[in-house]
Amino acid sequence: MTTPVLDHLSRPLGSLRLSLTDRCNMRCRYCMPEEEYLWLPRESILTFEEFDRLAGMFLGLGATKIRLTGGEPLLRQDLPSLVRMLSRQPELEDLAMTTNGILLADQAAALHEAGLHRVTVSLDTLRPERMLAYARSPKHPQVLEGITTAKKTGFRAVKLNSVIIRGFNDDEILDLLEYARAHEVELRFIEYMDVGGATKWSMADVVSRADLLRVIGERYGPVQPVAAVGWGAAPAERFLLPDGTQFGIIASTTAPFCRSCDRSRITADGTWYLCLYAEEGIDLRHFLRQGASDGELRALICETWAGRRDRGAEARHALVDRGVLYALEGLRADPRREMHTRGG
């Protein structure tokens, strides 16, 4: 059995997120709010073989979970080939993907056959006109079709993520929960976070965990928490309605879970970030393409993780006057700060 690498707070290197591309076919305001973007150079994007090699390094050091993200990961050509490669890693216990769902109906079967275990679809609104206004996409029917198809395909689990923003979709909290219940998928509400491209973020726009539980409790009655199990069991706190329906809340803004966070992320160009809020990352692509051996890569990963002290969400929570993390010029200085590049 692999002995996990631990950081300064005894957090293991447990879960890895791979951002396969910085491109996306939506323009959600909390992720990509501006009109123009700085894209990563094509030649800098990791190949599937490079992703697979890095994944093997992390899995050999105690990681057991990999999540494929973007941008929009389904924009990456021949994605089942990467899934097939990763699924052959002997230490991998869970291979998941987060997608906006637009292309999911066409690709779900191939991804499942290749070895993808779980799918999470972002669904912030049930109203097509709102998606058009907020995400600049008319493809709402395709998102719903993707959810339906994924549910029929046979994945271990299909979940929904909904970022709730006051004045945008906070009047759909119960509708989204009913949709999830009707389709037998677990919904996870996400507090609006001040990360990456959220250049118009304000605390006044955050619908907190307490707000969500109050609205849900008023409709359904007492809500019971579900105890979390193990390190990094999930970023979401889970709750049960009186009828047994389960849902989650990711309260990174008002109730950070930094001290139990075992997650890190690699951007599409191979930059490794130890925290979603991290200012700087480690350029793993450089070492890959300069001919570093497996032993050298493992040593670099071990040393870097062992020195990890990141508590980004806690640090933001402690600020008295909390504003946006990056103004537009800060994003222009480094495109890896954008959420569509970093992968959430």
Image (cartoon, rainbow, N blue to C red):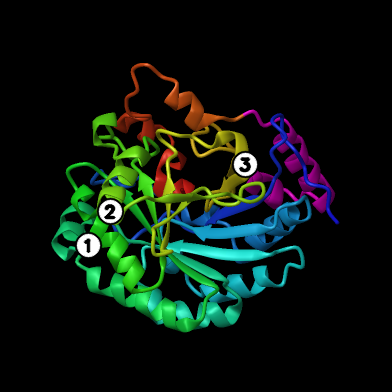
- Residue 91 locus on image (x, y percent): 75, 63
Predominant SS of the magenta segment: helix
Q: Secondary structure at mark 2?
A: loop
Q: Is residue 102 visible?
A: no
**Pair 3/1: label in front:** 1
Q: Mark 1 and mark 2 in contact? Answer it, CB < 8 Å.
A: yes
Residue beneath disc 3:
283
Q: Secondary structure at mark 1?
A: loop
Q: Amino acid at mark 2?
A: Arg
Residue at point 29%, 67% (across, down)? 179
Residue beneath disc 1:
137
- Residue 105 locus on image (x, y percent): 38, 79
Q: Amino acid at mark 1?
A: Ser
Q: Which residues are magenta?
A: 283-309
Nearer to us in this view, 46 or 28: 28
Residue 308 lies in quadrant: top right
Badge 2 density bin: few <14, some 14–19, many ≥20, Cα 10 Å: some
Residue 148 lies in quadrant: bottom left
